Every structure is written in structure tokens, then in C-alpha cells.
Image: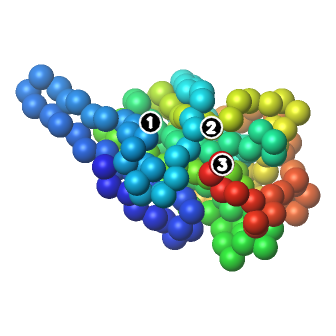
Amino acid sequence: MIFTRTSIPDVVIIDPKVHGDARGYFVETFRADKLEEFLGFKIPFCQDNESKSSHGVLRGLHYQLPPFAQTKLVRVMEGEVLDVAVDIREGSPTFGRHVTVRLSGENKRQLLIPRGFAHGFVVLSETCTFAYKVDNYYSPECDRGVAFNDPALNIDWIVEYEKLQLSAKDITQPLLTNADLFKYDVNLYV
């Protein structure tokens, strides 16, 4: 596995090694020991989630507040998305900035998004199966979000606005200036 820090160093791209031949391929999608070696500590992932979506579906920007804040390790099993992580840690040198990465079933690329970041994705392919690991359980009381179209974030979702498909919840998320945020001294991963 190759670990690469993004323009926001706390967000990490993971490129697993794919072993392919005429029969197909094999890939290790998660290695706790390799991740721990790279980060210097262990992340206690406890739940796996999966979603299926069609072209133009935009999910996000989501996060959970403490004590149920979550680190996410995301990947695409089939299809392609533009994945987005936004730094929502007040006082961070990268506060309000975002990272975008194309994840696909073909490139097998993954993104590690620590606590203190809002996360979302938009489906670029006809359909997409999206999977992620989290290190804390879902809590409706701690569930929060930021508006996907906040002008201050200036995210280019690639898909034309008229073709986006959003949930009622995601259409009404607050702007970053009105959202419940993290403090920069938050322990990012655990």
C-alpha cells in the first residue's frame, strides 16, 4: 500500500497494490498494521457501511460531533465518485479548505478522513457502490452537516447543478459559518 498525504496533510490517500491476471484481480483493501505503521497509532474501526447510488447523487457534507465523531476510510467498489473532505476545525491552518479525490472501482484508491472533517461525494458514473469503515457508531443526536453549495467552500462538484440528486436533509444543511464545528485541538483519529 502507498500512503500519500494530500494538500491537507491530515487527509490521506491510500493506493493498495492490485494483483491481476487473466482470472481477475486480488487486492488487500485494509491492513491495520500498515495503516498503524504509517500513522504511528491504531484506529479502532468498528463498523462498515455501504451505499448504492446513481449518477448525480450527492451525499454530504456529513460529520458527527463528539462523543461520536468518526474517522472514515472510504472507497468505491463499483463506479466512480468525486470524494470531498472539508476541514471544519476552528483554528486549523487549513480551516474551510477542502480536498477532492476521484475514487473508483477501477483505481481502487481510498481516502482516510479524520475526525474534524465534513465528508461528501457525488456519483460521476451511471451507478456506484460506495463503502466505508468508521471508528465510531452512528448517533442521530450527533449527526451534523454543512451545505454542499456553501459559496465560502467553493467546491466544484463537476456534475451540473441541475443534475444533482440530494436528500431533503442535504438540501437544508447550514453554511459553514452557522454549523457546529470542531476545535483545532481535537484528537483527529481517536
Amino acid marked by disc 1: Val
Q: Nearer the viewer, residue 115 or 49?
A: 115
**Secondary structure of residue under mark 2:** loop
User: Tag on residue 76?
Assistant: 1
**Secondary structure of residue under mark 3:** loop
Amino acid marked by disc 2: Asp
Residue drawn at (15%, 34%) of the image: 20
Along the polypeptide, which appears first: circle 2 or circle 3?
2
* x, y percent for residue 26: 23, 30
Along the polypeptide, which appears first: circle 1 or circle 2?
1
Most distant residue in the left direction: 22
Picture quadrant where residue 18 is located: top left
- Disc 1 crowd, CA 10 A, few/some/many (<14, 14-19, 20+): many
User: Tag on residue 131?
Assistant: none
Q: Which residue is mark 2?
A: 135
Most distant residue in the bottom direction: 93
Q: Which residue is mark 3?
A: 190
Q: CA distance from mark 2 to mark 3?
A: 8 Å
* x, y percent for residue 168: 81, 32
CB contact under 8 Å: marks 2 and 3: yes
Residue drawn at (35%, 41%) of the image: 108
